[in-house]
Amino acid sequence: MITRRQLIKTGMAGSVVLLAAGFLASPQPDLPAASQGHLVFLQAGDAQIIRSLAPVMLGMAGLALEDIVRGVDVAIANLLPAVQQELRQLFDLLGNRWGRRWLAGVHSPWAQAAAHDLAAFLRRWQQSPLLLLRSGYQALHALINAAWFGNPASWTALGYQQPQQIMGLLP
Amino acid sequence: MSLPDPVAEGVASGWRVLDGAVQTQDLQLSCDVLIIGTGAGGGMTAEVLAQAGLDVLMVEEGALRTSRDFRLLEAKAYPELYQESASRKTADKAINILQGRTVGGSTTVNWTSAFRTPAETLNWWGERYGLKSLNPQTMAPWFDLAEARLGIADWQTDPNPNNSVLERGCQALGLKHGRIRRNVRGCWNLGYCGMGCATNAKQSMLVTTIPGALQHKAGLLTRARVERLLPAADGKSLLGAEGRLLAADGHSLNGQQFSIKARHVVLAAGAIGSPAILLRSQLGGAQVGKRTFLHPVVVSGAVMPQRIEAYNGAPQTVYSDHFMHTQPLDGALGYKLEVPPVHPLLMGVTLSGFGASSAGLMQQLPHLQVVLALLRDGFHPDSQGGQVRLRQDGSPELDYPLNDVLWDGVRRSWLTMAELQFAAGARQVQVLHEQADLQSSWKAAREQIMQLPLKPLLARVVSAHVMGGAAMSSQPEEGVVDEYGRHWQLRNLSVIDGSVFPTSIGANPQLSIYAFALRAAHQLRDALKA
């Protein structure tokens, strides 16, 4: 059972992390990556984070990573401005070298990070005592899964298909 | 051959439908009755009033999407048809809420489960809230009327394998269970109700009462977000409402505004939207947005030896209310067992875990069977639900804290679901929690479930039923509206949607909303025609 005291602690720690996010954001961008055509929300560094995390999150190799990046971008573009702002903070935090190093615990830049380091980061945030870090993990989990499993290219491996008796009748 | 789209044909034939996104000037409109929202409450009300010859104007924040837009594609359906792309969340993000945002509201995307309001819920409202005239006998004719209008009847086809597992599990454990009635006519048994019905079999508001109203000269303004109600100088009535038109993407503003004068205003924007409009209009009152309920839902997945294909076939046809009755109504939370349809996107997002373990589970999708437990909130003294509040930009947010009485229900229902799935022959079972993994026996699953920490964003909690926040009451100070949805302070405002319920319903709420809406709408019709 979560106690009131734990809740207060979590809330306070959450605010500290948010403050840190604001403080750390932007001045020292951690990143290279070629510019991405046609992305609405994601910046080059954000796209690299998705590209690096998707195979670890989904537990699959050989993914169509650019499709996933585009899917995440479209998904975010359809969210409320207030939610987009929170995701901006999340990506700014992860894209910043200090945020990546100290909050995510990932030592190398995203593009070079090893799979086991990325998995350790995901696991730490997934299981974090801080609600805010758990929600950061859940956001990444939902976005990457939605982008991949919403894409018909993922379906064959699942053994899933739409009902054939109707598909030919659709406009 | 292609499938007919009677709603698109109706629009082409000259129904009075305005798309906010294509307007190049501000709109000034007037009507007898302005209905804000086109879901279960707004749709029912619109038809009753329009048939009586009243000049009705419906305003909907979502777009008009019709059967030709419904392609059985999650990635298309969720952004187009749901609030916040089907990822609306409570303030701490611990509960994901599925809620419609399109013409027809949630009825366009719901899973067609039709239950009358349980007698115990109605009786409780009488005893606890003094709403004595809302008892099972007086409500029966309204349920009859709604069922006749929407073709609600027993579902004659066999349950799909996903539902059959629930039935077999109940039989094996000796749990009372039954079949779910559905609002369909000529259903193809496809299983894609949640993406909009491509065959127009589902008797949603989109294909029944809204066309019924439009045929009686009602108007419909879509992609139009009501910002606020406009109070009259006397402070005791409304002049109408005003808001902003949305662009073709459905969420950004198109730059134009609208203003609607009305003799009477019906708020039917759902249990998050309606309180939000009252709050934005500074017409709060102490009770607005309080006691908002969700039927919080927890989930258990099973790998079955046989193919289940839980994405095929009518999504919900079997239920069990056994654990609704094993303790007092206001005791430890009761829960209803049902199954959800299992499609790849929503399953990928909802499954706990990541990496190889979740990939392994997703790759067994055709063998995956899923049970859900819907917790009955709002009866136990510690189950006060959540509160709708406004963000700085005026958008609504539901703060719904998960507390001990809820977590207790979560753990009990996980245990029930896991035991039931093994009893029905599951090879492995995993409840959806970030520290759970597949277990191969009921004993091992039970041991794991007993150890799982009950914390937000470790346990997966979802909801598709938002209720309350503008509750009916017998006394003005105890609620927001009376038993007909009439606002206690503003004489020409009614609230007619799921927000009027003083507790959760204890069953999928669509038929409850229909029946209460019909009752309120007939009263309103008589008052306006007098």
Image (cartoon, coloured by chain):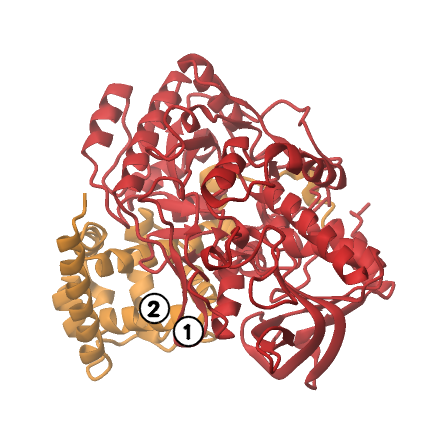
Chain colours: A orange, B red
Residue A87 got which mark? Answer: 2
Position in image of residue B168 (x %, y %): 48, 17
Q: Residue at x 33, y 42 (%)?
A: B381
Q: Residue at x 62, y 55 (%)?
A: B496
Name the quadrant containing residue B66: bottom right
Question: Same chain, marks 2 and 1?
Answer: yes
Name the quadrant containing residue A158: top left
Q: Is residue A75 left or right of residue B27?
A: left
Q: Is residue A108 visible?
A: no
Amino acid type, mark 2: Leu
Position in image of residue B252 (x %, y %): 54, 76
User: Label 1 near label 2: C-beta < 8 Å?
Assistant: yes
Name the quadrant containing residue B448: top left
Residue B332 got which mark? Answer: none
Where is the N terminus of chain B found, in terms of image quarters?
Answer: top right
Neighbor class of circle 1 (other Cα within 10 Å; few <14, some 14-19, many 20+) is some
Position in image of residue A66 (x %, y %): 42, 63
Q: Which residue is mark 1?
A: A41
Q: Residue furthest bottom?
A: B25
